[in-house]
Image (cartoon, grey):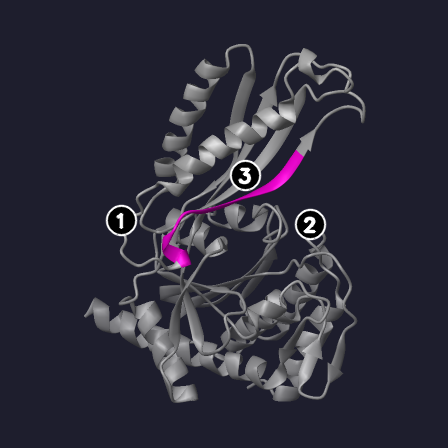
Amino acid sequence: MVSSAFAIKLLQDSLEIYSPSRSESKLANFLKDVCMDLGFEQANIDSVGNIIAIKGTGDPVILLCGHMDTVPGIVPVRLDGDYMYGRGASDAKAPLISMLLSAADFPKQNGTIVFAGVVDEEGNATGIKNLVKDKNLRPHYAIFGEPSGIENITVSYKGRLEIRLLCDVNNSAHASAPWLSLNAIEEIYNIWNSLKTVLDNIDVNTTTKNKANLVSYSITEVSGGSSHNVTPQKCRMTIDIRIPTSMCCDDVLNLLDVKINEIIKEKGPIIVKYHVEDKTEPFQANTSSPLVRSLVLAILENRKKRPLLLKKTGTGDMNILGNVLNIPVVTYGPGDPHLSHTTDERVYIKEYLTGIEIFKNTLFHMMRLHKNLQK
């Protein structure tokens, strides 16, 4: 059984290894050695840099998966009173290490635990996309480690469309004679206003106007123009659209495609193009699955209260795990999500240690409930 002192030191050592997206190799090798020292039968690093360690044999196969990368930026690592500070303390090394230690502390019995630390979650999800292609990895259940707070379980994430829009007016003019040419920046904003009308009028088939149940959108990037005194011929815009679980990405994309094609016909010589940079489907966990029931029981036993089941407005690796593998998945872990990516990122040590126990008790319940289902 791992001690609290060991658990705290392991988290601190992990935080000391700076691991922004696509620079996780040092941490992956460190965790590989830790896994072997803690009794995992296998620990390997795959072609994109994910660490995958296996303990036990047989069914059920339970995947405990978190990400090793952080956003850029140094937050000095220190233990200050009841808190551990450092980049990734909340998002998401505390959940990652708590899952690793719960698996290490879990006695070998009829069942397999797979621990995975993936790369590039904060970037392009390279790690999780490669992990789900592994034909040898066929888990029955998965938990993705993110800071939910130990009394909350994330059961739903929105989907995401990232669209790159281009407007080219085929000409430009001196800024002192703007009437000689159309302005690509002005035109793309006119186009955007037309698309917003489409998005605002989508019927999401729900009576609950919670933000998790609605389509939301934001312009995240705009670039246009070639000089301060020339009207812009071209303008590009990036649009981020979040899709509730009552829909799929193509429901929204098809509506936008119809509107954009109408605009192209109306605009005549103006060139309007778009392409989809990212399409991640929404995901909703089955709240009656053995996975959710096991995690609820473990939290109830430890905290003496039922956890909240959260529907998040963001999009996470849980979407890819759940939709590609078609298995029960939830997101859970110690830490305050509001501290993620901040200059004051930290985790409450007691919550981190409690998270290890909750993960471990969840594994016991999952083994038991899965076997009961097989009878």
Mark 2 and mark 3 lie on one chain; the one further toward the N terminus is: 2
- Which residue has dot 3 on it? 239
Mark 2 vs mark 1, foreground winner is: 1
Mark 2 and mark 1 lie on one chain; the one further toward the N terminus is: 2
- Which residue has dot 1 on it? 205
- Would you place residue 175 above or below residue 360 in this image? above
- Would you place residue 48 above or below residue 80 in this image? above
Q: Amino acid at mark 1?
A: Asn
**Relative image position of residue 307 (x, y in whole percent):** 39, 78
Residue 203 left/right relative to 17: left
Q: Amino acid at mark 2?
A: Arg
Q: Which residues are magenta?
A: 211-222
- The N terminus sits in image quarter: bottom right
- Local crowd size for mark 1, using a 10 Å CA cut-off: few (<14), some (14–19), many (≥20): few
Q: Secondary structure at mark 1?
A: loop
Q: What label does residue 218 carry, if any? A: none
Q: Residue 171 lies in magenta, yes or no?
A: no
Report whether residue 260 is seen: yes
Q: CA distance from mark 3 to mark 1?
A: 23 Å
Q: Amino acid at mark 3?
A: Ile
Q: Residue at x 56, y 15 (%)?
A: 270
- Which residue has dot 2 on it? 22
Mark 3 and mark 1 lie on one chain; the one further toward the N terminus is: 1
Q: Residue at x 62, y 16 (%)?
A: 169
**Relative image position of residue 325 (x, y in whole percent):** 38, 50
Mark 2 vs mark 3, foreground winner is: 3
Q: Secondary structure at mark 3?
A: strand
Residue 135 left/right relative to 284: right
Q: Residue at x 66, y 87 (%)?
A: 82
**Between 166 and 114, the one nearer to me in the picture:** 166
Q: Residue 217 lies in magenta, yes or no?
A: yes
